[in-house]
């Protein structure tokens, strides 16, 4: 369809089951999020991009394509935290955010739904629909971004959490070659179980070494990977198919022979004709709702780390980051990893969202850490307390996989020979109490600093306030300057850092006091 499309508001969020990091019913951050938890929100009509650029006549600007996080089951580009205006202006770049299909709509490995052969383009015989969406955004940028003053030959593919997982997968996807020229990923992981050696006890910090182990499970058995092999995904998706063929359909007795009585074309027609909200609800009710890249040996190779090790990937400059307290956002998972630990959270879901949404960072404190965290973990800094326990989640869930990735990349891209590999850790934890203890430098808390947005977002209430404003804004200014430098040259060093940043295994620590930036390099031996 030709012509000019009105672009006065954000496009729909992609269909998903509501979470505290989702869009609610109004496609923005507001109180509706608290009432839509666990319910379908968004639309199947959702594949849109958003573009920001400086208000100048400059052309050939570096381009950033950012993929939002949300475990590949939630998230939306209209999140005020991801508004690209401040970053585009501060860094002098074009910022683009793109939506993509989520959950079972984004990743499902069913032969009946594949588009290969005569029906689809070569290589589309894959259930990685979300990654195909990501690639469609890259194709649009290649063909159209010059109209917005961007340089199609200088595209940085970026993402956080699930978005970072997706972009790292695309590094090893042959069909994505040449569509991007740099990578800026935050908290991504592409390790497989076989990449993890040893047991939980082998990675316990000394302060946790005395914990009672329930069999001391091997790291390879903990479900740390967010990827699925072709075989594993097919097994799971056959269960999904069983659940979906009976949902909203009375033409066949689903309990007797839901699959065998239908041809593949009939199955595909039924699934594609289902109401999307009913489809997601059925999958969610069956507790089969997790999603992530499928190593199908069609779009993606069967081992992404292995592909990098074998030099079968897109070799580009890499900027990779984690946060110091990643695990605090996932503290509830402490009860599931094989140790004698319980869930630290006293409040969950809608109650915690309400606490954050109604919090006034400049008012006299009404909440304490005891209102949110169980007393067994307090004070947070005690031996085997909340900080040490969640540090274990950070280690298991993020640092091990970060090291696998960056160590493998460094062998193929050593310092001084080829594109650089740079790493940072985000340490800022100056939130008003009690959130400085509850979250600290948790997963996703670097995003407001990258985008320069501290108003009207899901995190702004618990991060903001007058007390930390001077230091917070100074750190954000340095972060955005560094991102801009990396986008232009593939090197994140910039005078605003006040220190020299060396390549991995060295790191740059991003932090601030209440009043000043505090950026510290940590050099490898």
Image: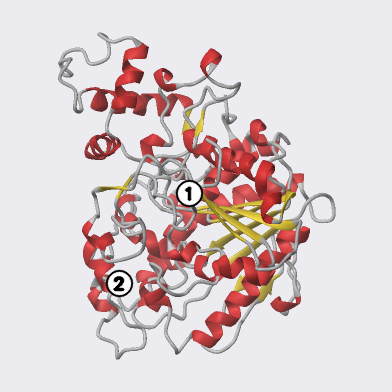
Where residue 343 sits in the image (x, y, percent)?
Answer: 27, 60
Above or below residue 120? Residue 299 is: below
**Residue 501 falls in image quadrant:** bottom right
* Residue at (72% x, 80% y) in the render: 498
Quarter location, residue 463: bottom left
Q: Residue at x 65, y 68 (%)?
A: 55
Image quadrant holding the C terminus, namely bottom right
Q: Residue furthest front?
A: 3
* In the rendered image, the vertical position of residue 163 relative to residue 525, given as above or below: above
Q: Quadrant of residue 137?
A: top right
First in sequence: mark 2 vs mark 1: 1
- Residue at image mark 2: 357
Is residue 207 toward the left or the right of residue 349 in the image?
A: right
Nearest the viewer among 492 and 143 is 143
Q: Is residue 182 visible?
A: no
Q: Is residue 304 above or below residue 377?
A: above
Q: CA distance from mark 2 to mark 1?
A: 24 Å
Of residues 463 and 295, the one drawn nearer to the viewer in this rendering: 463
**Residue 524 placement (x, y as % from top left):** 71, 65
The residue carrying pointer 1 sits among few (fewer than 14), some (14 to 19) or many (20 or more) residues within 10 Å by Cα, namely many
Label placed on residue 214: none
Element type where label 2 sits in the image: helix
The image position of residue 453, as x and y in percent, is: 50, 71
Label 2, residues with CA under 10 Å away: few <14, some 14-19, many ≥20: many
Horizontal side, residue 492 vs residue 384: left or right:
right
The residue wearing badge 1 is: 162
Instruction: Please tell me which residue is depicted at 46% across the width and 47% down the height of the picture.
Output: 199
């Amino acid at each position: 369809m030709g012509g000019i499309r009105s672009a006065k508001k954000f496009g729909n969020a992609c269909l998903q089951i509501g979470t505290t990091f989702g869009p609610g019913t109004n496609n923005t951050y507001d109180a509706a999020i608290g009432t839509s938890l666990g319910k379908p929100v968004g639309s199947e009509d959702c594949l849109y991009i958003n573009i920001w650029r400086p208000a100048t006549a400059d052309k050939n600007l570096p381009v950033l394509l950012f993929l939002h996080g949300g475990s590949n089951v939630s998230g939306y580009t209209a999140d005020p935290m991801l508004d690209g205006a401040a970053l585009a202006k501060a860094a002098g770049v074009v910022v683009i955010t793109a939506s993509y299909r989520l959950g079972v709509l984004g990743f499902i490995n069913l032969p009946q739904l594949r588009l290969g052969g005569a029906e689809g383009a070569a290589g589309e015989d894959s259930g990685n629909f979300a990654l195909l969406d990501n690639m469609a955004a890259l194709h649009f940028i290649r063909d159209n971004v010059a109209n917005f003053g961007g340089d199609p030959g200088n595209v940085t593919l970026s993402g956080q959490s699930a978005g970072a997982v997706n972009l790292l997968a695309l590094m090893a996807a042959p069909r994505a070659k040449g569509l991007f020229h740099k990578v800026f990923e935050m908290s991504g992981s592409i390790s497989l179980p076989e990449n993890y050696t040893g047991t939980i006890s082998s990675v316990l910090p000394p302060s946790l070494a005395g914990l009672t182990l329930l069999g001391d499970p091997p790291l390879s058995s903990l479900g740390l990977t967010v990827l699925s092999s072709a075989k594993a995904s097919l097994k799971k998706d056959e269960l999904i198919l069983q659940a979906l063929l009976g949902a909203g359909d009375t033409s066949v007795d689903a309990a007797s022979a839901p699959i065998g009585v239908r041809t593949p074309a009939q199955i595909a027609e039924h699934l594609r004709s289902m109401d999307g909200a009913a489809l997601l609800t059925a999958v969610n009710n069956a507790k089969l709702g997790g999603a992530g890249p499928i190593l199908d040996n069609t779009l993606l190779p069967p081992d992404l780390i292995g592909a990098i090790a074998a030099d079968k990937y897109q070799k580009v400059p890499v900027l990779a980051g984690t946060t110091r307290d990643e695990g605090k956002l996932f503290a509830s998972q402490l009860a599931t990893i094989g140790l004698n630990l319980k869930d630290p959270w006293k409040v969950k879901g809608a109650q915690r969202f309400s606490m954050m949404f109604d919090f006034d960072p400049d008012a006299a404190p009404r909440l304490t850490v005891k209102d949110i965290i169980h007393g067994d973990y307090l004070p947070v800094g005690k031996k085997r307390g909340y900080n040490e326990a969640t540090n274990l989640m950070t280690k298991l869930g993020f640092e091990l996989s970060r090291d696998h990735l960056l160590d493998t990349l460094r062998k193929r891209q050593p310092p001084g020979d080829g594109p650089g590999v740079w790493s940072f850790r985000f340490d800022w934890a100056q939130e008003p109490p009690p959130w400085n203890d509850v979250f600290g430098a948790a997963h996703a808390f670097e995003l407001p600093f990258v985008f320069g947005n501290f108003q009207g977002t899901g995190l702004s209430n618990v991060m903001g306030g007058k007390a930390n404003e001077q230091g917070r804004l100074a750190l954000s200014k340095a972060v955005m300057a560094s991102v801009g430098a990396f986008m232009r040259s593939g090197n994140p060093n910039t005078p605003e850092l006040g220190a020299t940043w060396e390549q991995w295994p060295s790191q740059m620590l991003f932090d601030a006091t209440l009043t000043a930036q505090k950026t510290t390099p940590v050099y490898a031996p």
